[in-house]
């Protein structure tokens, strides 16, 4: 088992997907992408083989944040945007737990943006699943911080004005040690990304493109439609050349003039220049450049997979280490000695 | 010959002070006093807080009773020599028990013209003023609006002024240390401390040891400070200007037998939290964001990791309480510390904690408001915020300490309530308690309450078909507390959240009758918290006026009550520690008196609560100056109420 989960007790018996289904009726809209993600997570959990009681799902507010109710683990459905902060307190005080955060684009990037970036820079042992549907669902259809510019919604009848966040770029900029993107409808890919995230020591951010069939249906169709996806999706695999398109005809190379990345048609001459994906690169520069390849409006050339996965000191591990070091240096705390201090006087009766 | 103490009326304890005895020692007269109030005042960079702290420490170890009032600007280094930049430290010490830092100083140490001007209004005629004459030059005087030199123009004739060239004498004393003028000048506060230590026969060893420890990495600076301190002492002993020194005997009769130390409110509160964690056998988790005047608790707790204390400096106030709540879910004794503006930001999470019914301590060190207000000054204006400052019906218990040392017990009490009833609890201290200090009898650890809790370990409910299940919202019939089932406990997996829950199962419920029931049940749980009855102090039993306070006004109110009684009037006194719920006998106590006076450092927040709950007319007396009440003024208020 990886370092990320080494302190979490193992299940005594083999588990199945059923073990992770709670008795609560799932209440998302029929056809919502959340169902697929829930099924993928419930299907993946037995693979970890962790004691179910040592798994906790914490969420904020929004459609996706109902997720914990449906997992037969410990869970907290908290308040808007604050799940990373609450999960940080839990994970940093209980290293025997596997703590997961479920959040959405509004929850994580709008009202909770501050907590998200600080969780990422601290590298607390949390796995954050960010369901990005590029719309506000629970409040019935306002634009979100990932909506494309000009989005016509109830609150923006003449089009939204603000530039969207790219969650992967944001996470890399916030010093995240693990950043990945996947898609709700690709169960296999989603599961593989979850597998890598679970094994990562520290904060893992997984952006999951999720279809809201009520308020933003088809937002990711370019990446799902078989014909278009070949040209639109760039699958990242550590150690493999970054190629995509029909017959893998397209490749990502470094632009020698600017240092930026660009897409070229691969030829015999330039084949050697095609970038080999290195998720473990110490510098985040290339991972960031990859995150900028996608067109924010059309999502054309969207990389999916693990952008970045590097080892960095884990906050809760270091917090525990400091406690142990303090005991080594000062001895275990002695309450009587603490209360008396060094400067006392005695009154005799 | 000047009296050391101005005495408004006869009596003892905060009402009077007398030259009780006089001897001549080595050519200089030594006079006995029963109490003294000293105020050190200077620029915010002059080290007045350190000077005051040291004098306090010497005084505490000598065995006097004491009470302190640090008073400083919010700016770290306000413009030098200006009135807003003046920082002061007042210390009241006595051979008997005292309750306040004193209304008016008997001795003012003024390090510059600004310090003199800013503080002179509080100094009664006849008091002693020690001034640093080196600073009374044209520019510093002009800066604060002195057209002529107050040391020469007769405007200080009513005081006993000791002009001392503190800067020059300090530089002279340190000339062998090879320091620059600027470096040497910095030790002038230690010269002043040495002089005052001589005047009041303070023990000096602890200050010398302190200086050597503080400047351990700069031995030359340490020795220079010790030299300045000794030079100040010697100056007092040799110069003719200081003909008299004073003794204030230890307050032996005041203190029950025991081991004592001096302690500030924030330190006592920090120790109370650690003690609560030890007594509960739960790890302490503090989630906090720095804010004046609460940050010292974060600093203090972060030093005690060897007690298993985790301190988390969050990205903001909301994350501070969020992390604490997360740790509470995981089974920690969770705390967040802040001041009023931080409480505003935490409100939504406090509401969540009310809904989740998890134990959580919210420590609010109140300061002047609204908004940023007066960060370094004191006020009691967060009471209604603590009581009502959330959406929906979200009752939260409130505990308020009355003196700096009482912050220790109040923290334990707040922890008891939080753990027993599974609820967030407000601990309402304030800037005056936080920074003020007094002697504290160090408790034996076996005197501390047992706060151990039982986590849920198995099913607590049987379904109709006989299945044993765990219901996270099935309550203890006595306390109405729900079970605390922490992650890691097999079979008790459950989900909780801020959405209304079905009674018992904790499942989401939008049912109208269930919501009504849950709102009323949460309220009933808080209303049913066991708090001790209110005790009334009425020595004659014949008082018709009651003065009722809460929190840090205890000292000034009690001092005022003593004055009133010394003058022959009867007044009853009571002080609230629990503001939510109120003690069960409060209504009955209030109805016993013709007049109920409630002094508060706000615009009448407790008075509002009392009027609403008990339909009793309260005589509200309020002050929002950022400073504690003065005993003399409160005594006048009480007399007026008694004779009205």
Image (cartoon, coloured by chain):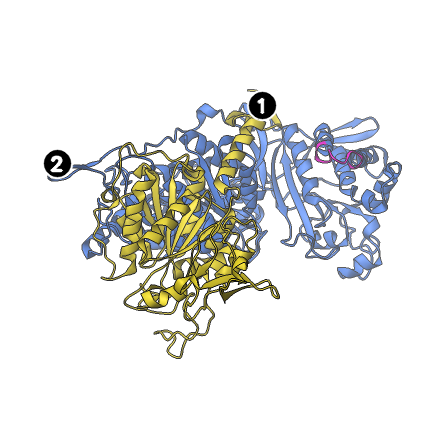
Chain colours: A yellow, B blue
Q: Which residue is mark 1?
A: A347
Taking depth in this image into account, of A219 and A175 the one nearest to the observer is A219
Secondary structure at numbered mark 1: strand
Q: Which residue is mark 2?
A: B466
Q: Name the outermost residue toward the top.
A: A349
Badge 2: residue crowd in 10 Å (few <14, some 14–19, many ≥20): few
Secondary structure at numbered mark 2: loop
Residue B299 x/y as whole percent: 57, 41
Badge 1 sits on which subunit?
Answer: A
Residue B507 x/y as whole percent: 23, 49
Taking depth in this image into account, of A144 and B626 the one nearest to the observer is A144
Q: How many marks?
A: 2
Magenta stretch encompasses residue B384: no
Q: Is residue A79 toward the left or the right of residue B112 in the image?
A: left
Same chain? Circles 2 and 1: no
Badge 1: residue crowd in 10 Å (few <14, some 14–19, many ≥20): some
* Residue at point 32%, 38% (across, down): A49
Labelled pair 2, 1 in contact (Cβ < 8 Å): no
Q: Is residue B140 toward the left or the right of residue B64 in the image?
A: right
Q: Is residue B405 toward the left or the right of residue A16 in the image?
A: right
Instruction: Write down the region rendered in magenta.
Output: B213-221
**In the rendering, which numbered label is found on residue B124?**
none
- C-alpha gap between disc 2 and disc 1: 64 Å
Residue A128 x/y as whole percent: 40, 51
Q: Is residue B617 visible?
A: no
Q: Is residue B416 visible?
A: yes
Badge 2 sits on which subunit?
Answer: B
* Residue at point 50%, 61% (across, down): A252
Examine the rendered structure and indicate whether residue B238 appears above or below residue B111: above
Residue B253 x/y as whole percent: 57, 26
């Amino acid at each position: 088992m990886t370092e990320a989960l080494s302190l979490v007790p193992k299940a005594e018996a083999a588990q199945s997907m059923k073990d992770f289904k709670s008795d609560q009726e799932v209440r998302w809209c029929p056809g919502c992408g959340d169902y697929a993600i829930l099924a993928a997570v419930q299907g993946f959990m037995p693979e970890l083989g962790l004691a179910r009681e040592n798994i906790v799902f914490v969420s904020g507010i929004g459609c996706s944040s109902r997720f914990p109710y449906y997992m037969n683990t410990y869970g907290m459905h908290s308040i808007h945007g604050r799940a990373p902060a609450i999960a940080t307190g839990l994970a940093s005080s209980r290293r025997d737990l596997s703590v997961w955060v479920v959040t959405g684009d509004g929850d994580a990037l709008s009202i909770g943006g501050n907590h998200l970036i600080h969780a990422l820079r601290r590298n607390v042992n949390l796995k954050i699943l960010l369901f990005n549907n590029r719309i506000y669902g629970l409040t019935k259809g306002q634009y979100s911080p990932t909506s494309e510019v000009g989005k016509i919604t109830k609150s923006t009848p003449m089009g939204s004005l603000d530039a969207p966040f790219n969650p992967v770029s944001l996470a890399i900029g916030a010093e995240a040690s693990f950043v990945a993107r996947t898609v709700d409808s690709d169960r296999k890919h989603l599961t593989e990304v979850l597998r890598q995230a679970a094994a990562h020591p520290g904060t893992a951010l997984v952006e999951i493109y999720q279809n809201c069939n009520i308020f933003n249906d088809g937002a990711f169709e370019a990446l799902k439609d078989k014909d278009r996806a070949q040209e639109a999706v760039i699958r990242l695999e550590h150690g493999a050349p970054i190629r995509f398109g029909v017959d893998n005809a397209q490749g990502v190379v470094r632009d020698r003039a600017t240092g930026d990345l660009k897409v070229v048609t691969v030829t015999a001459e330039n084949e050697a220049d095609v970038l080999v994906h290195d998720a473990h690169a110490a510098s985040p520069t290339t991972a960031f450049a990859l995150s900028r390849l996608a067109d924010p409006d059309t999502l054309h050339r969207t990389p999916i997979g693990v952008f970045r996965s590097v080892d960095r000191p884990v906050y809760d591990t270091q917090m525990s280490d400091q406690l142990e070091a303090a005991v080594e240096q000062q001895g275990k705390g002695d309450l009587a000695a603490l209360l008396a201090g060094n400067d006392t006087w005695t009154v005799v009766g | 010959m000047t009296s050391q103490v101005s005495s408004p009326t006869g009596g003892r304890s905060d009402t009077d002070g007398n030259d009780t005895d006089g001897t001549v020692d080595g050519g200089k007269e030594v006079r006995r006093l029963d109490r003294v109030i000293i105020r050190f005042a200077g620029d915010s960079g002059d080290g007045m807080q350190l000077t005051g702290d040291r004098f306090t420490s010497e005084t505490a170890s000598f065995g006097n009773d004491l009470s302190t009032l640090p008073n400083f600007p919010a700016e770290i280094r306000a413009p030098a020599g200006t009135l807003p930049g003046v920082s002061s430290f007042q210390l009241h010490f006595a051979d008997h028990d005292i309750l306040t830092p004193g209304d008016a100083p008997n001795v003012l140490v003024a390090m510059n013209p600004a310090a003199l001007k800013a503080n002179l209004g509080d100094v009664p005629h006849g008091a002693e003023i020690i001034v640093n004459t080196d600073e009374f030059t044209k520019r510093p005087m002009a800066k604060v609006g002195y057209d002529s030199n107050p040391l020469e123009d007769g405007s200080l004739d009513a005081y006993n002024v000791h002009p001392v060239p503190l800067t020059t004498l300090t530089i002279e004393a340190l000339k062998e240390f090879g320091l620059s003028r600027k470096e040497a000048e910095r030790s002038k506060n230690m010269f002043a401390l040495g002089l005052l230590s001589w005047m009041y026969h303070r023990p000096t060893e602890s200050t010398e040891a302190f200086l050597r420890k503080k400047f351990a990495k700069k031995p030359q600076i340490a020795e220079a400070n010790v030299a300045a301190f000794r030079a100040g002492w010697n100056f007092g002993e040799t110069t003719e200007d200081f003909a008299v020194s004073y003794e204030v005997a230890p307050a032996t009769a005041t203190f029950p037998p025991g081991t004592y130390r001096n302690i500030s409110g924030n330190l006592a509160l920090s120790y109370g939290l650690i003690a609560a964690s030890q007594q509960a056998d739960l790890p302490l988790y503090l989630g906090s964001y720095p804010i004046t005047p609460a940050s010292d608790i974060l600093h203090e707790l972060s030093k005690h990791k060897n007690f298993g204390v985790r301190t988390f400096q969050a990205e903001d106030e909301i994350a501070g309480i969020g992390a604490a709540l997360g740790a509470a879910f995981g089974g920690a004794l969770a705390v967040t510390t802040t001041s009023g503006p931080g409480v505003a930001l935490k409100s939504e999470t406090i509401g969540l904690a009310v809904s989740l019914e998890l134990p959580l301590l919210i420590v609010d060190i109140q300061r002047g408001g609204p908004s940023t207000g007066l960060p370094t000054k004191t006020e009691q204006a967060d009471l209604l915020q603590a009581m009502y400052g959330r959406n929906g019906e979200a009752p939260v218990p409130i505990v308020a300490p009355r003196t700096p040392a009482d912050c220790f017990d109040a923290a334990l009490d707040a922890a008891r309530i939080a753990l027993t009833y599974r609820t967030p609890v407000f601990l309402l201290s304030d800037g005056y308690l936080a920074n003020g200090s007094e002697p504290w009898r160090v408790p034996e650890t076996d005197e501390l309450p047992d706060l151990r809790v039982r986590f849920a370990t198995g099913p607590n409910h049987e379904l109709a078909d006989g299945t044993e299940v765990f219901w996270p919202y099935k309550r203890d019939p006595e306390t109405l507390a729900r079970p605390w089932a922490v992650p890691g406990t097999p079979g008790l997996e459950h989900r909780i959240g801020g959405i209304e829950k079905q009674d018992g199962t904790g499942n989401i419920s939008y049912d109208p009758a269930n919501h009504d029931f849950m709102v009323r049940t949460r309220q009933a749980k808080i209303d049913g918290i066991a708090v001790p009855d209110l005790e009334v102090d009425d020595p004659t039993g014949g008082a018709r006026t009651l003065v009722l306070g809460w929190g840090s006004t205890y000292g000034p109110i009690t001092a005022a009550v003593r004055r009133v009684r010394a003058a022959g009037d009867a007044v009853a006194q009571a002080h609230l520690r629990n503001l939510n719920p109120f003690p069960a006998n409060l209504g009955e106590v209030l109805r016993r008196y013709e007049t109920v006076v409630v002094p508060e450092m706000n615009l009448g927040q407790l008075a509002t609560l009392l009027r609403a709950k008990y339909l009793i007319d309260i005589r509200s007396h309020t002050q929002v100056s950022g400073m504690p009440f003065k005993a003399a003024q409160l005594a006048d208020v009480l007399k007026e109420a008694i004779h009205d």
